[in-house]
Amino acid sequence: MQTAAHEPTPEMTAFYERRTLEHIERVRKCLSAMAAVTPYGDALSERAKEHDLSKFGPEERIPYIWLTEFHRCRQIGVPFDYPVGLEERVRVAIQHHVTSNRHHPDFHVDPNQMSEVDLIEMVCDWTAMSHEFDQDGGSARGWADRTVGTRFHFDDDKRRYIYRTIDLLDQQLGSASTA
C-alpha cells in the first residue's frame, strides 16, 4: 500500500496507538498508587484521566507517530530517516507537548513552580518510561539522576521531594521493576 510521504503507514499508526495507550495505562497505575498514599488522591485521579491525551490531538498525533517509529527503529537497530520536513514537525510537536502538559518542567517558566501534584505525575511518567524501556529497574531514579540538576534545575526542596516521591512510588509498586 502506497502512502503519501508524510502519512505514516497503518502499521506505524497501530504501533503508536498501542504503545501510547500502554504508556498512559502505566502512568495511570502509578498515579493510582500515589493517590492512595498522598493527600492528593482526587487531583491525581483527575491527572490519570488526562495524562498525555494531547498526543492524540492534531498538533502532536502525526509527528508523534513518526517519533515513535524513529525510536522503535533505533531500538531494534534499523536505519531510519524522517521524510523531508518531518523532523521539524516532530520538534514542534515535542515543544507543544512539553509546554502544554503540567507534568513537564518545560511547561513552567521555572521548574520550581511545579506543584507537588505536577511533580508526582512527572515521577509517574518517568517510572512508566523506565519500565517500558527496561531501564533502571523500572524506577524513575535513573532518569532523575540524569536530569535533575543538569537539564532541570530544581531547588533543594523540590529535588528532595522528587527523590522522596520516587522512593514512595517504588515502595508502593512493590519493587522498582513492577511499574
Image (cartoon, rainbow, N blue to C red):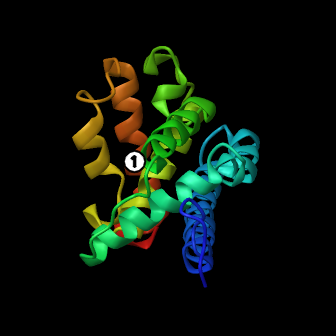
Residue at the (40%, 36%) spot, across then down: 162
Q: Nearer the viewer, residue 2 or 124?
A: 2
Q: Looking at the rendering, which quadrant does residue 103 occupy?
A: top right
Residue at the (29%, 30%) spot, across then down: 151
Residue 65 in percent (x, y) is at 55, 61
Badge 1 amino acid: Ile
Q: Nearer the viewer, residue 6 or 172?
A: 6
Query: Is 15 rendered above or below residue 112?
Result: below
Q: Quick one: SS at disc 1?
A: helix
Q: Is residue 55 left or right of residue 78?
A: right
Q: Looking at the rendering, which quadrant does residue 177 occupy?
A: bottom left
Residue 178 in percent (x, y) is at 43, 72
Residue 34 shows in the view: yes
Q: Residues within 10 Å of mark 1 (few under 14, many from 20)?
A: many
Q: How many marks?
A: 1
Residue at the (25%, 27%) spot, across then down: 149
Q: Which residue is mark 1?
A: 166
Residue 134 shows in the view: no
Query: Is 128 rendered above or below residue 146?
Result: below
Q: Is residue 54 left or right of residue 169?
A: right
Q: Looking at the rendering, which quadrant does residue 3 occupy?
A: bottom right
Q: Nearer the viewer, residue 151 or 171?
A: 151
Residue 40 in percent (x, y) is at 67, 38
Q: Nearer the viewer, residue 110 or 8?
A: 8
Residue at the (29%, 71%) spot, across then down: 75
Q: Quadrant of the N terminus?
A: bottom right
Residue 124 in percent (x, y) is at 50, 51
Q: Is residue 147 left or right of residue 99?
A: left
Query: Is 80 rendered above or below residue 127?
Result: below
